[in-house]
Image: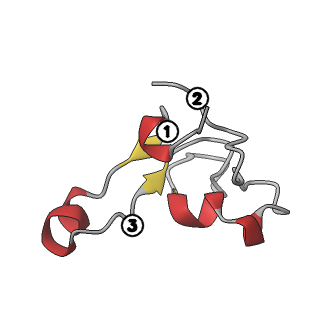
Amino acid sequence: MTKLCKDCKWYRKDWIESIIFRTNKYDMCACPNTTNDLVTGHKQRFCDMLRACRYSELDYSCGPDGKFWEAK
């Protein structure tokens, strides 16, 4: 089964970017494991960055396998 960000509990769609520019480049991940703000957890990261192979060594990266992926 492929774990897609759009099917994840932590996925947040950037509707303005999606409607105006027809892209999902700025969609965010709200998972508490991927944030660098451990106090509030509000700072979110881009989904495409977290799932990229080149960032898979980082401890907050979800990686291509979807390490922090959770069903909605």
The kind of secondary structure element at disc 1 is loop
Residue shown at 67% from the left, 58% from the top: 36
Mark pair 3, 2: CA separation: 20 Å
User: Looking at the rendered structure, which numbered label has been put on residue 36?
Assistant: none
Give the residue number, with chain letter if any, for mark 2: 70
Residue shown at 85% from the left, 63% from the top: 57
Image side of residue 7 versus residue 50, left or right: left
Outermost residue toward the front?
A: 1
Mark pair 3, 1: CA separation: 14 Å
Q: What residue type is labelled 2?
A: Glu
Q: What residue type is labelled 3?
A: Tyr
Q: In which quarter of the image is the C terminus?
A: top left
- Is the C-beta separation of discs 1 and 2 under 8 Å? yes
Image side of residue 57 versus residue 6, left or right: right
Could you say where residue 59 lies in the image, as x and y percent from the top left? 82, 55
Mark pair 1, 2: CA separation: 7 Å
Residue shown at 54% from the left, 64% from the top: 48
Q: In which quarter of the image is the N terminus?
A: top right
Outermost residue toward the left?
A: 20
Give the residue number, with chain letter if any, for mark 1: 10
Could you say where residue 46 lies in the image, as x and y percent from the top left? 51, 63
The kind of secondary structure element at disc 2 is loop
Could you say where residue 71 lies in the image, as x and y percent from the top left? 52, 25
Give the residue number, with chain letter if any, for mark 3: 26
> With respect to residue 4, does 22 lie above or below?
below
Task: Confirm whether residue 64 shows in the render.
Answer: yes
Quarter where residue 25 is shown: bottom left
